[in-house]
Amino acid sequence: VQLVESGGGLVQAGGSARLSCTTVGSDFNMKVMGWYRQTPGKQREWVAHTSSNGGHTSYADSVKGRFTLSKENAKNTVHLQMNSLKPEDTAVYYCVTLKNFFSGNVTSWGQGTQVTVSS
């Protein structure tokens, strides 16, 4: 599965940004999708993921209440709406597919998109 992210950039603290991830491949409506992020010198951190039909979503405590993940099966796209951004949200964000909703097994990674939050 090929995953293509877009929407990163420079944002001021307190602002918003929206990341999108479009897949090239089949059976998007059956895929569990999510986002990870990574800052230099740190391991990749799970951010959120959603079930194949988009009906169930789970978030890391660090982003809960600020980020919203949505899945548009008709467009083979997932979106990560990020509000009330903080400098500590600065990272490269990766779109992923997961084996299933309850495991952390990532099956595909996108190339990543940089989000920089200035204070």
Image (cartoon, rainbow, N blue to C red):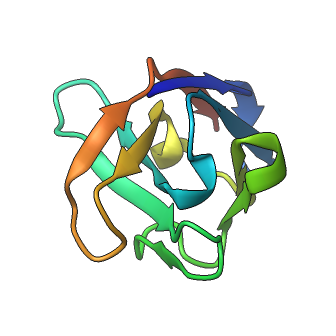
Query: Which sits in the foreground, 81 or 55?
Result: 55
Query: Which sits in the foreground, 3 or 87?
Result: 3
Q: Is residue 63 above or below residue 97?
A: below
Q: Is residue 39 above or below residue 64?
A: above
Residue farthest front in this picture: 26
Q: Residue 4 at x, y = what percent?
A: 59, 22
Quarter of the rendering occupied by the C terminus? top right
User: How many numbered marks appear?
Assistant: 0
Q: Residue at x 55, y 66 (%)?
A: 52
Q: Residue 114 at x, y = what percent?
A: 54, 22
Q: Residue at x 61, y 26 (%)?
A: 5
Left/right placement of residue 54 relative to residue 7 reads left
| Residue 82 in view in this figure | no
Q: Residue at x 70, y 58 (%)?
A: 71
Left/right placement of residue 58 relative to residue 83 reads left
User: Based on the displayed image, in which of its 4 quarters is residue 39 positioned?
Assistant: top left
Q: Is residue 63 above or below residue 44?
A: below
Query: Which sits in the foreground, 49 or 81?
Result: 49
Q: Residue 91 at x, y = what percent?
A: 45, 33
Q: Residue at x 70, y 38 (%)?
A: 19
Quarter of the rendering occupied by the N terminus? top left
User: Based on the displayed image, in which of its 4 quarters is residue 103 positioned?
Assistant: bottom left
Q: Is residue 15 above or below residue 25?
A: below
